[in-house]
Amino acid sequence: MSRASTKGIFCLEGDWDRDLRTTITVLPFLELLAQVNRPPIPSIRRDIGTATEMEYYLKKWCQKRYARFPILYLGFHGDPGVLYLGGDRRATVDLDWLEESLAGKCKGRLIHFGSCGTLATHGRRLNRFLRVTGAVGVCGYKVDVDWLLAAAFEIILLGVIQQFSLTRSGLAAVDRRVRREAGGLTKDLAFRMVVAPRKRN
């Protein structure tokens, strides 16, 4: 794998608990991905507690200077079509909000919803999200997931993504590979990969 092919991760993460003394974070496995892969997988991570903060960093991610970080990792609590930005679940954003914020800005990019149940959403809704944003794909979970199991799976997933192009065919290959290599986890977590539909003539 050449250095040019390395796909960086742009991670936005919310509080996992209303108690701010809780130290749970995805940072350790982002660091592990950087340490064990050759070349290292770079990452940028920011804490998010409000929609204003989310909007600010989404705009940053879409800038050309961060093109080397085409994987957007959204680490939050969730429900179908929704992300909870804080540990108390009062601040939320939904697919409509994200779609409007990212409209036309995600060409050649992948969005991973590292959140419970967010992708338990109708396929037509997700296809519209992909069409409006221009993203090549979205992935995530359709059920409430165990945090440690999801973390273990995402280390595998984000590593496999490095081996393929961020194209329709590349993400289809990623989906097949992770289901072959981590089939039990993909079933337990109800993992879902949705690739942008072909454009109609």
Image (spheres, rainbow, N blue to C red):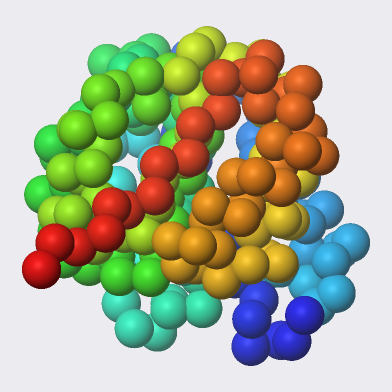
Left or right of 98 on screen, residue 32: right
Q: Quadrant of the N terminus?
A: bottom right
Relative image position of residue 12 (x, y in whole percent): 45, 47
**Residue 152 visible in this rendered orientation of the protein:** no
Relative image position of residue 53 (x, y in whole percent): 29, 48
- Above or below, 103 relative to 65: above
The residue nearer to you, when weighing 201 against 82, is: 201
Question: Image point 19% across, 33% down: which residue?
Answer: 125
Question: Image point 65% across, 35% down: which residue?
Answer: 25
The residue nearer to you, when weighing 154 against 172, is: 172
Q: Quadrant of residue 167?
A: bottom left
The residue nearer to you, when weighing 170 against 27, is: 170
Question: Image point 76% across, 45% down: which residue?
Answer: 156
Left or right of 72 on screen, residue 27: right
Q: How many marks?
A: 0
Left or right of 13 on screen, residue 155: right
Question: Image point 19% across, 63% down: which residue?
Answer: 199
The residue nearer to you, when weighing 33 against 60, is: 33
Q: Quadrant of the C terminus?
A: bottom left
